[in-house]
Image: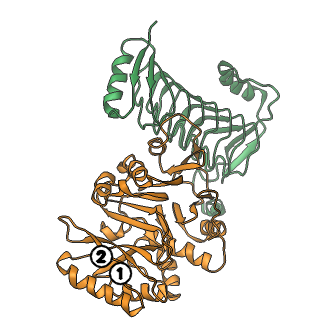
């Protein structure tokens, strides 16, 4: 069933800690894996990458290969990468890179290494952290509690349509669109139809997770000229299945809900700050006092919440 | 008579429900505080207890009620009173999806709106909603009455069996296999008898009573078009 959450603060603050709490309260909805997308202070130039290597015995060689692709595209590391390891075979990394000449072309080349090493987020401010395990476990391992930012997303996954793998966890980056991430609760029943169409346009998918598709689908619609709101509204009638998903850009969070109203979304907004989640008891972890709670439980709904009164026209 | 106060907070729900069950045996009113929208509070309450939830509750509150009088002071989450057999549940605010799902008796009174699929598959009892009922309310209701004093959302009363949906306000759209009929004076009197103890009788209401068109009850090849509506 999965649980999703979104959080917006008025100013940079402990959004990582809040997202861990929002997801810990929904861990019963899916304890296979947990993930977070946090928008921190934007870089003026360069990108912050989060990713994963699949065999830490091969880490040094794989990272060298990865760095070679950067150099091929006129970019390089802006410092030593941070590596996170534990008893698992895979390892995770965070690194800052200078601007490649053509971001999409570089992403395409790094995707050739996807069996060994995989970029899971790329942005001026977006960082996606995801791993096997519950909210506190993943939060502790990746120091999510310490991540400062204005807004972000969380996801607790009950694997149904694809395997329990760290890279099949949510959130998904809308590769290759920088700074766009998604979380999704539901099932897309025309997944293969859409995947085929998008692949023919040149998009690549590194997992068989239907949520990865939605991220790219919405971003592609926006690339073709739709506003975020128009793209979300179109998704309700174009994508088949039961779903509630939230998509983020540096400007805020948008959501869409299917025609059958099967997947809940509860929101509390107070003094310009916002928490959204699958379950009300989750949003109450950051707004514990009794207050107005908005239940978006009807069919065919879309909504957009800007950060600091910014619009979501990105 | 003094009341028994039970604190929820972050305690384990099983422990709280065991405490509620013990308190029910005392015959004293029970007040449950600091509810924090937690799920499964007061599931399986016995006959004759009187219990108030101070604040909002999560999913399944009052589910499988067998005769208690339950008050939820603010909002309730999904499936409030699911499967209840007897008793009364009052929701002071709004009720989430599937309020009264599969209930077989008793009354649920929602002072605000009720979410989608209110009374889904109910098999008896009554649900009174002072506001509106959401998308596909009354879906496959086998028996009982859903009474909405406000309006109703899309696909109202979809695929009804012998349940009835009464709406006094606007209906966004009807579901499949629904007939809207003019209620008789006797039928309106029956509904008023349900509303009277709640202080909600108003003779000026323009009722729409929705019942099954019965075309989906049994499949007949000559009437396949009815099935193709789904």
* SS at circle 2: loop
Against A38, residue B54 (above or below) is: above
Judge whether B25 appears above or below A10 on screen.
Answer: above
Report which colour depicts chain B: green
Q: Position of residue B29 (x, y in %)?
A: 45, 14
Do the numbered discs 1 and 2 sit on residues whose CB atoms are within 8 Å?
Answer: yes
Q: Which mark is residue A80?
A: 2
* Residue at mark 2: chain: A
Residue B214 is left or right of residue A93, and the answer is right
Q: Residue at x 70, y 37 (%)?
A: B166
Residue at left 42%, top 11%? B28
Residue with the mark numbered 1? A77
| Residue closest to the eye, A85 or B204 | A85
Label at residue A297: none
Q: Quadrant of the C terminus of chain B?
A: bottom right
Element carrying mark 1:
loop
Q: What tint does the image give chain A?
A: orange
Q: Position of residue B20 (x, y in %)?
A: 37, 23
Chain where mark 1 sits: A
Closer to us: B161 or A294: A294
């Amino acid at each position: 069933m999965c649980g999703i959450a979104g959080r917006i603060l008025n100013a940079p603050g402990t959004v990582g800690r809040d997202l861990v709490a929002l997801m810990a309260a929904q861990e019963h909805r899916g304890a296979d894996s947990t993930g977070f997308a946090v928008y921190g202070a934007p870089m003026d130039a360069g990108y912050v990458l989060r990713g994963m290597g699949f065999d830490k015995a091969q880490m040094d060689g794989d990272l060298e290969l990865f760095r070679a692709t950067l150099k091929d595209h006129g970019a390089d590391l802006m410092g030593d990468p941070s590596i996170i390891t534990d008893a698992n075979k895979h390892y995770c990394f965070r690194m800052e890179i200078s601007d490649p000449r053509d971001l999409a072309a570089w992403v395409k080349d790094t995707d050739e290494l996807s069996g060994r090493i995989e970029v899971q987020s790329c942005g001026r401010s977006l960082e996606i952290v995801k791993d096997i395990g519950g909210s506190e476990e993943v939060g502790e391992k990746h120091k999510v509690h310490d991540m400062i930012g204005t807004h972000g997303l969380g996801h607790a996954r009950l694997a149904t349509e694809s395997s329990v793998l760290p890279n099949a966890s949510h959130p998904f980056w809308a590769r290759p669109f920088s700074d766009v991430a998604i979380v999704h609760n539901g099932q897309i029943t025309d997944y293969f139809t859409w995947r085929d169409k998008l692949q023919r346009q040149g998009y690549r998918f590194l997992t068989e997770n239907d949520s990865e598709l939605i991220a790219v689908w919405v971003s592609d619609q926006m690339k073709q000229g739709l506003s975020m709101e128009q793209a979300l509204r179109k998704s309700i009638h174009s994508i088949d299945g039961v779903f509630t998903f939230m998509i983020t850009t540096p400007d805020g969070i948008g959501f869409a809900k299917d025609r059958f109203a099967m997947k809940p979304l509860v929101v509390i907004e107070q003094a310009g700050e916002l928490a959204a989640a699958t379950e009300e008891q989750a949003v109450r972890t950051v707004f514990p006092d009794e207050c107005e709670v908005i239940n978006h439980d009807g069919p065919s709904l879309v909504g957009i919440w800007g950060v600091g009164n910014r619009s979501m026209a990105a | 008579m003094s009341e028994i106060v039970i604190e929820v907070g972050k305690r384990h729900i099983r422990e709280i429900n065991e405490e509620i069950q013990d308190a029910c045996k005392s015959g004293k009113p029970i007040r449950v505080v600091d509810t924090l929208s937690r799920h499964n509070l007061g599931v399986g309450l016995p006959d004759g207890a009187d219990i108030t939830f101070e604040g909002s509750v999560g999913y399944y509150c009052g589910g499988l009620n067998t005769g208690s009088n339950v008050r939820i002071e603010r909002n309730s989450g999904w499936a409030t009173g699911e499967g209840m057999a007897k008793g009364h549940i009052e929701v002071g605010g709004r009720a989430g999806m599937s309020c009264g799902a599969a209930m077989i008796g008793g009354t649920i009174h929602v002072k605000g709106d009720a979410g989608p699929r209110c009374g889904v598959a109910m098999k008896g009892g009554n649900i009174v909603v002072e506001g509106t009922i959401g998308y596909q309310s009354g879906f496959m209701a086998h028996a009982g009455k859903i009474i909405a004093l406000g309006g109703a959302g899309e696909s109202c009363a979809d695929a009804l069996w012998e349940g009835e949906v009464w709406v006094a306000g606007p209906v966004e759209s009807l579901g499949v296999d629904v007939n809207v009929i003019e209620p008789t004076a006797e039928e309106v009197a029956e509904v008023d008898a349900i509303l009277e103890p709640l202080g909600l009788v108003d003779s000026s209401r323009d009722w729409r009573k929705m019942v099954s068109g019965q075309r989906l009850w049994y499949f007949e090849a000559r009437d396949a078009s009815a099935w193709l509506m789904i």
